[in-house]
Image: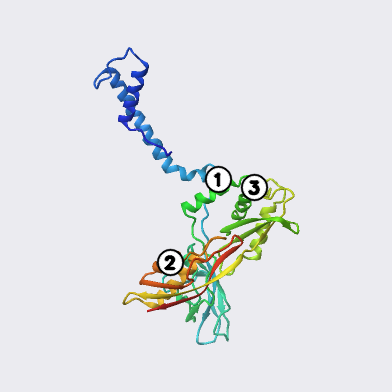
């Protein structure tokens, strides 16, 4: 049962009932009597305390994981990719300053590292760019970072051959509370939830799934599948980093998460690539080229941020499409139903075909 505020009238009623039941000498409890006035004074104060406690819980309860346990909210990650700067001429070096601002047609800004178009060349080598803010919205498609917001002498165009990746949203209150619950359940460290909690403690890891092997396969008791939301799957370096956290080194700062005698191996999940095909009915006067870009981004952001073992839900795909500005209706033909993802797999978006009419 949740916390309930007792009102002034309820408090008075309780006090009067208690006195009637426990004191035969007090006979006048009518409004205006001395005893009734004492009860009313106490009830006013008690009601204020009830309200103050309720507001305090409501305001600070969500902060307890961080203030009491030091359990920090994940702040999100900025997406990255590379771009190539180009010009029509080829004479002289054309330097690109670090901090040069680029953006997509939808206004998403990226910040460039230093680069250069060498003398005799029309294109630069690939130059790394980083999203200005964290979030999945910056996981933009290839050939969408095309606007030079800052003037760069002797440079005329820019584009990204590869999609931006790695952008992760700031953790929501719901996600934070859910992760904290798993953290509490996994304080024993060596249980399955503890192993998953240990994996999620690694920067960039968005989901984990521990699967026991009965009987063990070779000398492996548990496979710990991890994911970081990237389009191509979690990197070897991140697998190695997570394995080190799970094993620990025997020190107080890094005791590890696996039980003695148990071999828990960090592995990559199988990637289930799902193509998506739909016919889109657009509102009149809408820029269909921009709509197609937005549709691709919305679907990729939904599918590629699913946790390990989470199904690709047909209605969620429809919802992602309908959330794009200018979409009036949708007929989603591929997939035709929910796509089942096992505890050892993670979904990823494949070829997206949007027929806009």
Residue 320's label in the rendered image is: 2
Q: Residue 92 placed where, x, y %?
A: 55, 84
Residue visible at 49% across and 65% down? 338
The local secondary structure at tag 2 comes to: helix
Q: Quick one: label 1 or label 3, which is nearer the N terminus?
A: 1
Residue at the outermost left position:
32
On residue 70, the disc is 1
* C-alpha gap between disc 1 and disc 2: 35 Å
Disc with the residue nearer the chain's start (1 vs 2): 1
Label at residue 111: none
Q: Nearer the viewer, mark 1 or mark 3?
A: 3
Q: How is the image coloured?
A: rainbow
User: What residue is pinned by disc 3?
Assistant: 189
Q: Is residue 6 left or right of residue 97?
A: left
At x 58%, y 82%, the residue is: 118
Q: Residues within 10 Å of mark 2 (few under 14, many from 20)?
A: some
């Amino acid at each position: 049962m949740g916390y309930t505020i007792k009102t002034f009238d309820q408090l008075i009623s309780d006090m009067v009932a208690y006195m009637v039941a426990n004191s035969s000498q007090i006979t006048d409890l009518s409004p205006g009597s001395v005893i009734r006035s004492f009860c009313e004074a106490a009830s006013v104060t008690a009601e204020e305390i009830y309200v103050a406690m309720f507001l305090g819980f409501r305001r600070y309860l969500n902060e307890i994981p961080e203030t009491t346990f030091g359990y920090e909210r994940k702040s999100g990650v900025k997406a990255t990719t590379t771009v190539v700067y180009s010009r029509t001429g080829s004479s002289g070096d054309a330097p690109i300053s670090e901090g040069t601002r680029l953006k997509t047609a939808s206004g998403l800004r990226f910040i460039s590292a230093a680069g250069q178009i060498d003398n005799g060349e029309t294109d630069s080598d690939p130059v790394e760019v980083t999203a200005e803010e964290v979030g999945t919205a910056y996981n933009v498609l290839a050939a969408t970072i095309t606007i030079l917001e800052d003037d760069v002498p002797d440079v005329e165009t820019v584009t990204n051959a590869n999609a931006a990746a790695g952008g992760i949203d700031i953790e929501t209150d719901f996600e934070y509370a859910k992760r904290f619950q798993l953290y509490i359940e996994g304080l024993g460290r060596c249980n399955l939830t503890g192993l998953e909690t240990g994996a999620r403690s690694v920067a960039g890891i968005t989901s984990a799934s521990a699967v026991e092997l009965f009987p063990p396969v070779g000398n492996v008791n548990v496979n710990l599948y991890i994911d970081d939301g990237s389009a191509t799957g979690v990197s070897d370096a991140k697998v190695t980093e997570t394995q080190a956290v799970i094993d620990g080194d025997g020190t107080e700062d890094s005791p590890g998460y696996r039980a003695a005698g148990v071999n828990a191996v960090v592995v990559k999940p199988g990637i289930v690539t799902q193509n998506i095909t739909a016919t889109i009915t657009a509102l009149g006067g809408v820029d269909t080229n921009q709509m197609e870009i937005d549709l691709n981004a919305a679907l990729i952001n939904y599918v590629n941020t699913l946790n390990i073992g989470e199904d690709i839900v047909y209605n969620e795909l429809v919802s992602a499409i309908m959330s794009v500005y200018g979409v009036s209706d949708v007929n989603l033909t591929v997939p035709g139903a929910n796509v089942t993802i096992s505890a050892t797999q993670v979904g990823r978006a494949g070829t997206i075909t949007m027929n806009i009419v």
